Amino acid sequence: MILYALDIAKKIKDKSKKEIEKKKLKILLSVILIGDNYASKVYIKNKKIACDYVGIDFKLFKLDENISQEKLLNLINNLNLDDKITGILVQLPLPDHIDKTIIMQNIDPKKDVDGFNPFNIGALILEKPKLIPCTALGILELIKFYNIKISGTYCAVLGRSIDVGKPVAALMLNANSTVAVCHSKTENLIEITRKSDIIISSIGKAKFIKKDFIKRNSVLIDVGINRDENNKLCGDIDFDSCIEKAHSISPVPKGVGAMTIAMLINNCIKAKLIQLNIIE
Ligand code: GUN
C-alpha cells in the first residue's frame, strides 16, 4: 500500500478552514526567512498557499544572510509582544553564526507554531503536549489515518534531529511503541531495522533503505527529500525495491511533506485558542 497524503492533508485543511470561519478566528502567522536558501523559499511559498486557502494572514520577514543574532532576537521579541501576531516561525536552516537553540528559546511558547521551544518540547516529553513539531505530528496523523497499529510495535527512528527524529520518537513512545532512535554512530543498524514493525527515516540519504534492511510487512515512513542519480526527487527509502516486501510506504513527494503543512495550520489555530485561553 502507498500512504499518499495529499487528499488527507486537503481534508485536514478543509476542516481547519471551516473552524476558522465558524469561530471567526483572526490568525496572523509571521515567518522569518534569513538569507536566500532555495528550498526554504519553496517551503515558505507552500506555507503561504496553505494559509491563503484556510484564511490565515501571512507576513514574511526577509532578512539579510548576515543579520546579527541580536537583531534577529530583537525582531522575535517585537513579534512576541505584538498582540496581532498569532504565530512565529523562523525558517530553518539558519546561517552558521546564529544559534538555533537560542532563537527557539526566545520564541514565546504560545506563539511557537513549530513546537521547537524547550517548553513545548518538554511538554511533549512529559506527555502533556501543547504545540507539537509539525512533521512529527503529521507522521502520526498519517499512520493513524491508515489505521496502522502503533501500540506494542517496535519502531526504528532514523535521524535524531530536533525538528523530526526526537519529537517523532517521543510521539511514538507516548503512543506505546518501543522506539529505537538510530543515527550516524549506530552500530549494526540493519539488525535494528530488520526487527522493526515501523521505520521512520529522516536521514537525507537517497534510497538508503533497501529491501534487505526491512522486515516483511513493515510500515515505512519516508521523511527524506533527496535527489537521485537522475536528479529526480526521492526519499531515504528505495521505494521500488521495498514496495513488494513492506506493508506500506509513504511516497516522496506526495507523502509526509503535505502533512507537515496541514499540521502547521492546525498549530496556528491551536496557538490562537491557547492565546484566547480557550484551551491550555
Ligand atoms: N525547514 C524545513 N522544515 C522546517 C520546519 O518544519 N520548520 C522550520 N521552521 N523550518 C523548516
Image (spheres, helix red, strand yellow):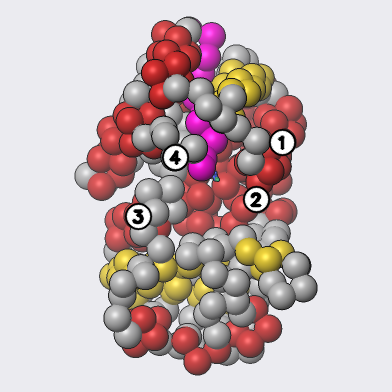
Residue 279 shows in this picture: no
Q: CA distance from mark 3 to mark 4?
A: 22 Å
Q: Disc 3 on helix, strand or loop?
A: helix
The residue under the point 70% across, 59% down is 254
Classify mark 1 as within 8 Å of ligand 1 or not, answering yes or no. Answer: no
Q: Disc 4 on helix, strand or loop?
A: loop
Residue in the foreground of this view, choosing between 212 and 187: 187
Q: Disc 1 on helix, strand or loop?
A: helix
What is the three-letter code of the residue carrying label 4?
Asp
> Dot 2 corresponds to which residue?
258
First in residue order: circle 4 vs circle 2:
4
Whole-percent x, y for residue 43 in the image? 65, 42
Q: Nearer the viewer, mark 4 or mark 2?
A: 4
Q: Nearer the viewer, mark 1 or mark 4?
A: 4
User: Is residue 89 in the magenta section?
Assistant: yes
Q: CA distance from mark 1 to mark 4?
A: 24 Å
Would you say 254 lies left or right of 105 here?
A: right
Which label sits on residue 45? 1
Q: Can you say whether 172 is above or below 2 in the image? A: above
Mark 4 and mark 2 residues within 8 Å of each other at the beta carbon: no
Q: Nearer the viewer, mark 1 or mark 2?
A: 1
> Dot 4 corresponds to which residue?
96
First in residue order: circle 3 vs circle 2:
3
Residue in the foreground of this view, choosing between 2 and 36: 36
First in residue order: circle 1 vs circle 3:
1
Structural crowding at the residue carrying mark 3, measured as other residues with C-alpha within 10 Å and reported as few (<14), some (14–19) or many (≥20): some
> Dot 3 corresponds to which residue?
166
Q: Nearer the viewer, mark 3 or mark 4?
A: 4
The magenta stretch spans which residues? 83-93
Q: CA distance from mark 1 to mark 2?
A: 13 Å
